[in-house]
Amino acid sequence: KKLVRFLITSTMSTLSTESPPFNPRINRGNLSPGPSHSRSHSPSPRSSGEVHSNAVSKYTFEYKSETLEIRNVWAENLEEEMAVIREIIEDNPYVAMDTEFPGVVARPISETYSPDFHYKSLKVNVDLLKIIQLGLSFADEEGNFAKGCPCWQFNFKFDLKGDMFAQDSIDLLVNSGISFQDHATRGIDPLRFGELIMVSGLVLDDRVKWVSFHSGYDYGYMLKLLTTVDLPSDEKSFFETLRLYFPTIYDIKYMTSLCDGHFGGLQKVADDLGCQRIGTEHQAGSDSLLTMTTYFALSRAKFMNGDKIDDSKYKNELYGYGTNHTVRKGTIHAQAQHASSGLTNGDL
């Protein structure tokens, strides 16, 4: 029997005007490890220009005197694009990752401040829900984007008529250009994607460096795609499985916890470091590109050893999970939020 209290279980075919009691992922810059959907303080998407629909085949942008492409992947071109990725990973071993998912719909019935509460929350939601979009961006060891098309945006099958979601998360994605009609009719089968990524050269290889921001839920959905089963029952087993598939990971949010003067969500950290956004915020491709440029800018500003980046202080740590110092910060923040908002705030 699953000890779960459902907060939102909307399977409505039309978007309602009523928001759920809290806003999943509204600010990924808070100190709680929970999944905040937005990386800025504004509910409106930021972009390098107009908001782009993910129904189109690609977007092109001018960046540092080059033309870069964000390519949309649907069921019909999945095999072709994965074949391209198998080639470019050889010379571009840095992979920045971002996901879009349908928010938070459930909480475990357990002590809110128990050591494993945040992992239990992650597990119950990832087990229940489906990924909507995955962005992967590629760069070489100097941080140079792969030439031409450095970014793929994978769009998964998701049907608002039957799949579970949190209303405010869907509203945010719709405003950011996500076409749920296309996700329902031509979205990628997660099982087929899992098969292809297993033989892509992206996983099970410690030479591949995965870069992310505040990414417990992102890796939860990635493991679900790879294993096709529920997440492990406990946090220790989760990290063991994570290390198997992703031997080398860098979480920028954890990195900022080691630095003075850098805090907040991805967009704020990027702005502080002078990193340019390419594309529309809250689409996984644009967010993954910004994740990559932010990682290299922060590494060069704060984590150099001679002329090389020293990853020893942050390698294989996740913000808010495991046994590192950010877990304590997350608990303190949760207690403060509980006192002020009665556990209805989306930052928890």
Image (cartoon, helix red, strand yellow):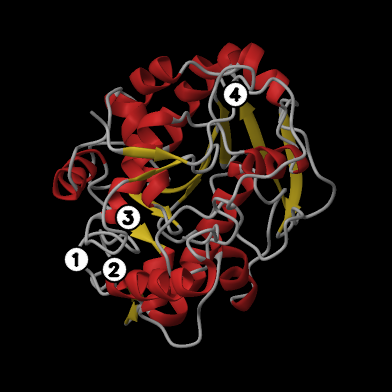
Residue 118, label in figure: 3
Task: Name the outermost residue toward the bottom.
Answer: 260
Residue 98, label in figure: none
Label pair 2/1, CB-CB below 8 angstroms? yes
Mark 3 to mark 1 CA distance (whole Å): 12 Å
Q: Earlier in the sequence, mark 1 or mark 4?
A: 4
Q: Earlier in the sequence, mark 2 or mark 3?
A: 3
Label pair 2/3, CB-CB below 8 angstroms? yes
**Residue 33, image x, y percentages:** 39, 60
Question: Label 4 neighbourhood size at 10 Å, few (<14), some (14-19), many (20+)?
Answer: some
Tell me the element at label 1.
loop
Q: Is residue 29 above or below residue 109?
A: below
Q: Quadrant of the N terminus?
A: top left
Foreground mark, 4 or 3? 4
In the rendered structure, the answer to whether residue 56 lies left or right of residue 254 reads: right
Amino acid tagged 1: Thr
In the rendered structure, the answer to whether residue 62 lies left or right of residue 12 reads: right
Q: Nearer the viewer, residue 82 or 31?
A: 31
